[in-house]
Image (spheres, rainbow, N blue to C red):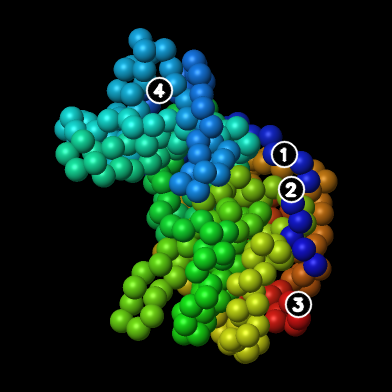
Amino acid sequence: MKGGIPSKKKVPVKINASLSNYLSTYNRNVKLPLQYDDLLRIKTSIPLIDMNDDDTLWETVFYEDSYTQEIHKALTTIYALLKTDGDVEVMEHLSVARIDYCTFGNTKPFRIRIINKLNDNYDHFYVKLADASRVYGLELEHILSPNRVTYLVDRDTLVEEHIVGIPGDEFIKNNLDDSKFNQIRIAKEFVKFNERCFVRLLGDMRSYNYVIEITPDIEGSQFRIRTIDFDQQSYEGRKNFYLPQYFKDNNPIIFLGIQNMTLETVRQYQMEERSLIANRAKASYDRLTELLSVMAGDQISQPQKVEQLKTELAQHHKNDIFIKCKNMGEIVFTNIKLLLQKDFKQSILIDDFQ
């Protein structure tokens, strides 16, 4: 069985008053000196080519000279808000090196390259159209995963930090031919990543929608898979869409697991990650409950997708509690409740890939 592709391009969902109030409570709502639409006043653009002379599908954009200075000042201010809580002293040695635009993403992001003039070191951040589904995804990542995510919202504008790592498709192409010890660790991390996505129902984790961090260790390396795409948070109706194991892009890592792990080992790693997720949920119980309550009052998907997903999850978990759910927020809430009640069933079996 396959995870498939999204049924059709997802339409961004407006942030409602309840979600906006939640974001204000947790210091995500910030007045920005620039809105997403301001960056659309593009004069010209050129394709962005990578070091291998391949088209990246991003375009480097340029503005009228009179407007460029205004845009650059606003963007360095946003970077200060994102990184130093608005300490403007850091702006003195920062400048905008490049602005890139991607037209194929749901949120049509702008990627801003900021350079430190003192040492030529650079960093990136993103300016996107705000989408409630993506914001729910960012918050669930922040609360339930081992990762912390920094982002800001102002009306229809979403600003996100750059998540560092090797893109999954490049990692699979170039980094799997490693020691057996590291291959086992890669496969182990994928099992855990698969678990995290399914518990909080984050979909579409094809290999180019996540990155992999590599940390040298005493023996071998440690690996961490981090999602960089939150657009498909609880939107599609197919259960398997929320299991990275079913996307053929990820098969090379799946095959590592088949070669190096027994079914008992896979189940052990699943249980370990489930326990960690439950501990994070308990540690941030009030915040998580508030978020899921807001999410349960929102409509971030289509009725037919909600019906399909709750039916498939009821069959999977052998629990009719999902049938009572009215929207995606309630489905996520129910899925996490089952986890906390230790009644959560996973579907990853080595036999599925043989």
Q: In the figure, is residue 2 to the left or right of 64?
A: right
Please name the residue that numbered disc 4 is placed on: 34
Query: Residue 237 versus residue 68: which sits nearer the camera?
Result: 68
Which residue corresponds to mark 1?
Answer: 9
Q: Which mark is residue 6?
A: 2
Q: Which type of secondary structure does the marked residue at label 4 adopt?
A: loop
Most extreme residue toward the front, as rendered?
53
Could you tell me which residue is drawn at 43 percent across and 41 percent down? 160
Rendering coords of residue 297 (x, y %): 64, 42
What residue is pinned by disc 3? 352
Between 154 and 240, which is closer to the camera in this rendering?
240
Q: Earlier in the sequence, mark 1 or mark 3?
A: 1
Query: Residue 335 placed where, x, y %?
Result: 65, 63
Q: Is residue 313 above or below residue 138?
A: below
- Which residue: 52% across, 75% down? 177
Asked whether the residues under the numbered discs 4 and 1 touch, taking CB atoms below 8 Å apart as contact, a structural biologist would say: no
Q: Within 10 angstroms of label 2, few (less than 14), some, or many (20 or more) residues?
A: some
Q: Residue at x 41, y 74 (%)?
A: 222
Q: Mark 4 to mark 3: distance in Å?
A: 49 Å
